[in-house]
Image (cartoon, rainbow, N blue to C red):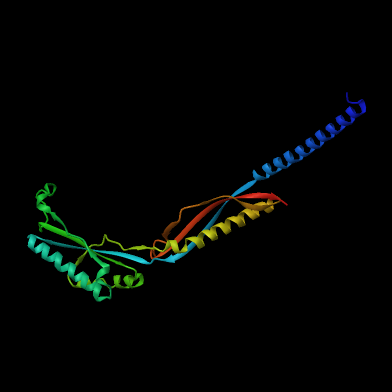
Amino acid sequence: MMPTENKTDAAMVLGLLLAIGLLGGGYFIGQAVQEARSMDRFVTVKGLAEREVRANLCIWPIGFKTTGNALPEIYAGIGSDKQAIIDFLTGKGFAAAEIFSSPPRLTDYHAQAYYGNQRPPNRYSAESTVTLRTGQVEKAREVMQASGELIKAGVVLQTNYQPEYLFTDLNAIKPEMIATATKNARKAAEQFAVDSGSRVGAIRKATQGLFSITNRDAYSPEYKKIRVVTTVEYFLVDD
């Protein structure tokens, strides 16, 4: 049988070990709670990046129309006008590979009952389009100013066709714009952190917005405004 004093010493050692264990466990639990709370502190900010670029692709549809009372006359007129437009464009320095034509669309006014006795003097009307698709944007704009030459040549141009300007090199500038948007987002987060007496930590989550390409304004569609907004969540850390 163990002596009484040995039992007492063993109990004291066991109690001391339990106390140390409780103190250590409490410390780590406290640290975990503190870290969990710090992980819950974050700020969500948005960063904007904008850039103005010139369009690098011009699509210019040139619509034209021919009227007459005989189908052979109509198709001959359409063919002649189409060739006149092609010659006009190639004569201005555009390659044949940049020029495309569409089949004619024929309308027979006499076959349309709603005209009644008010039929147009010409039975047939045919419309077609020759389209220029080129990367020579500025040159295309200059040639548009000279399109009156086609009217002088007898080509009846349709005014409901407008040129379209596109920017196709978005992938080349995406990385830099995303970096700029993220940098601007961090600036906003840093200001928030200063106001709240903390500092910005690591990124918690980041979401890239969609890139948008719009005309700079209604009067210069050859200039484009590119815009992207990123949403970033940063941890906030106490100083």
**Which residue is rendered at x = 44% and y = 66% of the image?**
53
Q: How many marks?
A: 0
Q: Point out residue 15 in the picture as x, y percentages from the top left corner.
A: 84, 32
| Relative height, residue 105 to residue 56 (above, below) | above
Residue furthest right as drawn:
5
Locate residue 75 relative to residue 166 in the image: left or right. left
Residue nearest the observer in this picture, 113 or 57: 57
**Which residue is rendered at x = 69% and y = 44% of the image?**
35
Residue 185 visible, this angle: yes
Locate residue 125 relative to residue 160 in the image: left or right. left
Residue 216 visible, this angle: no
Q: Point out residue 93 in the picture as x, y percentages from the top left corner.
A: 28, 76
Locate residue 165 relative to residue 209 in the image: left or right. left
Residue furthest top as drawn:
1
**Which residue is rendered at x = 18% and y = 67% of the image?**
82
Residue furthest front as drawn:
1
Residue nearest the observer in this picture, 135 or 119: 135
| Relative height, residue 79 to residue 12 (above, below) | below
| Relative height, residue 120 to residue 155 (above, below) | above
Q: Point out residue 119 in the picture as x, y percentages from the top left corner.
A: 11, 53
Q: State the image quarter where residue 137 is shown.
A: bottom left
Is the N terminus in the top left, top right, bottom left or bottom right quadrant? top right
Residue nearest the observer in this picture, 108 or 169: 169
Q: Point out residue 132 in the picture as x, y percentages from the top left corner.
A: 27, 66
**Which residue is rendered at x = 75% and y = 37% of the image?**
25
